[in-house]
Image (cartoon, coloured by chain):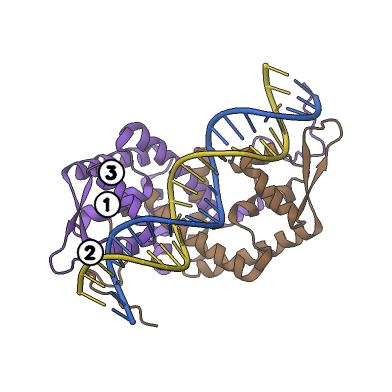
Chain colours: A brown, B purple, C blue, D yellow
Amino acid sequence: MNSKKAKLPDSSEAVVNKSDLDEFIGYNLKRAYMLVRSDFRATVSNDMGEDGLSPTSLAALSDIVQSPGITQSELSRQLGIERSGLVSIIDDLQGREFIARTPVPGDRRVQALVPLTKGKAAYDKTLTLIRAHEKALFKHFTKTEKQQLLALLGKLREHEIP
Amino acid sequence: MNSKKAKLPDSSEAVVNKSDLDEFIGYNLKRAYMLVRSDFRATVSNDMGEDGLSPTSLAALSDIVQSPGITQSELSRQLGIERSGLVSIIDDLQGREFIARTPVPGDRRVQALVPLTKGKAAYDKTLTLIRAHEKALFKHFTKTEKQQLLALLGKLREHEIP
DNA sequence: TATTGTTATACTCTATAACTATA
DNA sequence: TATAGTTATAGAGTATAACAATA
């Protein structure tokens, strides 16, 4: 495998490209998230195969496992996406028999979303997987640094609600 | 108006939704980035109107301003997107007269990308705008906290190259 | 043969609007 | 009238594959 660059100005070596934008937290947040997301996807699809979940599908399944009986409207609000966009996600989770839509006595418009055994298992397995994945991804971080990062990101979410 | 939830455990109040996923840095990174990105888009499109740039277009313009004469292939590598995907971005920047494609003597395959006056102006204005925007977004953060966050995000990028 | 810029194409993600069946 | 779920549709954003011109 040869991966030689043709004629890059090679102003700098293996140094991470310096840019004006590096001063911005938002830009660094983006680069960091892109990194973690692609790693997440690779990890989950490698180790879970057909049962692999996208970040958003995992978040949906998580809410359903933790709040059995939640409706799609409530779920869409929590995830911050439109009701219409949730349909295909729920269809997919139902198709894999991870969750079920069940009728709610008293209001025939809504359907409660409940986790099924297979869904609960996939959820637990995914969580275990991500724990290992994060451990590897942040292996250069001390425990304190990880806690700091978590606290700082949490502080941002806290103040600028959603 | 009867708002009886079918069988929700209604464990918590208006507290920011606690979730299993909150333990993961990746999840918090995603929520934080989504927040900052939507704020970025709103700010830039409100204050720049027709001259508003998407995050990726801004990154492209930034590289062109800082490395005048860069080629599309080099740029695509730096941005981490495919050459083909860059075409419409460059078309757009050229259409607004922010940049120009100029021939390179010696290699008629490539076209050097150079910033134009209008592009440099839009770039400077956008940077000023984002500085103010970040200042507001992180108003609850101390200077030390902001530096810490920047350092921690930088550390992640540094180690897991791109 | 390999590379640059490009087109064609498709897939994912998400948003808007409108429909239906209920309430 | 208003709400829950759904469909249809469209727009970003990005990826793959192939092509012409050039190296």
- Image mark 3: chain: B
Query: Which residue is label 1 attached to?
Result: B62
Left or right, residue A148 beside residue B154: right
**Label 1 neighbourhood size at 10 Å, few (<14), some (14-19), many (20+)?**
many
- In the picture, the disc for residue B127 is 3
Where's residue A10, x and y in %?
A: 23, 71
Of labels 1 and 3, the one closer to you: 1
Judging depth in this view, the residue of A115 and B110 nearest the camera is B110
Compute the Cα span from label 2 to label 3: 29 Å
Q: Is residue B116 above or below residue C1?
A: above
Asked which secondary structure carries label 3, the reply is helix
Where's residue B145, x and y in %?
A: 41, 49
Query: Which residue is label 2 attached to?
Result: B110
Q: Residue at x 39, y 44 (%)?
A: B142
Of labels 2 and 3, the one closer to you: 2
Q: Is residue B77 above or below residue A57?
A: below
Q: Amino acid at mark 2?
A: Val
Where's residue B95, x and y in %?
A: 26, 44
Q: Amino acid at mark 1?
A: Ser
Image quadrant where residue B152 sits: bottom left
Asked which secondary structure carries label 1, the reply is helix
